[in-house]
Image (tube, rainbow, N blue to C red):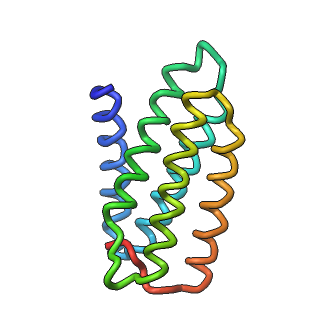
Amino acid sequence: MAIHFNKAKHQYQKIEKSVVETNEPIEIVKTMIKELQKSMNIVARTNNIKDQRVKRNKHFSKSLVIIYTLQTSLDFDKGGSLATQLFQIYEYCRQQLIKGFKTHVVEGIEKAINSLREIFDNTTANNANVTNT
């Protein structure tokens, strides 16, 4: 599992380097959210497909790394209730991802992806102060 974590972390760092150059925190968050949605979709799509187990595990780990990074980068002082809402949706995604991964029932993962999309779209539409630093 440590090998998968390190690979996912390395992949995230490559993405982060390319986006950090913009110096726009919202662009960094958008990229991370897109990657999270992509990886969670792969976990859901590869459910119960034996020859896709390695791919599923890789994207499960990658999703967890992204969620952890998003959660730990929230600035609750600057973000207030928006930061709290984002933390809650990230946590919901984490819980549904783990539950779906263990039970091979993907409906929760799909709901989490949709919830993430809805909340994040509202966040960017409002052009609110970014709560992630």
Where is residue 2 drawn, in percent x and y?
28, 28
Residue at (63%, 77%) from the top-left corner?
Answer: 122
Where, by quadrant of the figure, is residue 17 drawn?
Answer: bottom left
Where is residue 51 drawn, in percent x and y?
59, 13
- The correct choice, above or below, for 3 with respect to 81 in the image is above
Quarter of the N terminus within the rendering: top left
Camera-side residue of 50 and 26:
50
Residue at (35%, 70%) from the top-left corner?
Answer: 74
Residue at (30%, 49%) from the top-left corner?
Answer: 13
- The correct choice, above or below, for 21 with respect to 24 in the image is above
Where is residue 70 drawn, in percent x and y?
39, 60
Q: Is residue 83 left or right of residue 13?
A: right
- The correct choice, above or below, for 87 with respect to 13 in the image is below
- The residue positioned farthest toward the right in the image shown: 107
Residue at (31%, 73%) from the top-left corner?
Answer: 133
Where, by quadrant of the figure, is residue 43 drawn?
Answer: top right
- The correct choice, above or below, for 52 with respect to 89 in the image is above
- The residue positioned farthest toward the top in the image shown: 50
Where is residue 39 drawn, in percent x and y?
54, 42
